[in-house]
Image: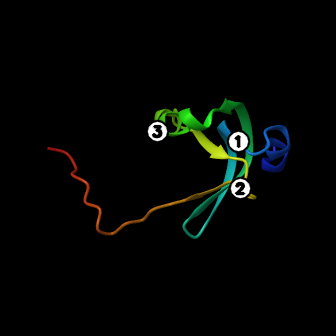
């Protein structure tokens, strides 16, 4: 389903989505195809966002486009192996 279709079905609310297809441009993941799972109440949106399974996101339908901004922080240090 296209993002605009989700916006029409769930106007002005948070929705839990499965990402089916996307394209990357610069530091953005532009979501092109999704499968809506269910609407999420505003009070539960934060909990649902951080508890979403890999490949799922919580996003608000007031946004014209469904875009994830990718962080490529050179100051972030990751410890590898022991």
Q: Residue furthest front?
A: 43
The residue sitting at 46% across, 38% down in the picture is 50
Name the colour scheme: rainbow
- The answer to which of marks 2 and 1 sits earlier in the sequence is 1
Secondary structure of the residue carrying numbered label 3: helix
Q: Which residue is mark 3?
A: 50
64 relative to 51, above or below: below
State which quarter of the image contains the N terminus: top right
Front position among marks 3 and 1: 1
Nearer the observer, 22 or 81: 22
Secondary structure of the residue carrying numbered label 1: loop
Pointer 3: residues within 10 angstroms few (<14), some, or many (20+)?
Answer: few
The residue sitting at 73% across, 58% down in the picture is 65
Pointer 1: residues within 10 angstroms few (<14), some, or many (20+)?
Answer: some
Q: Which residue is mark 2?
A: 63
The residue sitting at 80% across, 46% down in the picture is 7
- Give how far across and how far down residue 46 sits, in percent: 50, 40
Tell me how far mark 3 sits from mark 1, CA to CA: 17 Å
- The answer to which of marks 2 and 3 sits earlier in the sequence is 3
- Give how far across and how far down residue 31 sits, in percent: 69, 52
State which quarter of the image contains the C terminus: top left
- Give how far across and how far down residue 55 sits, in percent: 57, 38
Tell me how far mark 2 sits from mark 1, CA to CA: 10 Å
Nearer the observer, 58 or 75: 58
Secondary structure of the residue carrying numbered label 2: loop
Q: Which residue is mark 1?
A: 13
Pointer 2: residues within 10 angstroms few (<14), some, or many (20+)?
Answer: few
Residue 67 falls in image quadrant: bottom right
């Amino acid at each position: 389903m296209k993002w605009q279709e989700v916006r029409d079905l769930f106007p002005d609310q948070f929705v839990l989505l499965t990402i089916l297809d996307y394209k990357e441009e610069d530091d953005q993941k532009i979501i092109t195809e999704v499968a809506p799972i269910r609407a999420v109440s505003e009070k539960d949106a934060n909990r649902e966002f951080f508890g979403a399974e890999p490949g799922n996101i919580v996003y608000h339908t007031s946004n014209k486009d469904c875009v994830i901004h990718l962080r490529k922080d050179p100051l972030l240090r990751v410890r590898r192996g022991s």
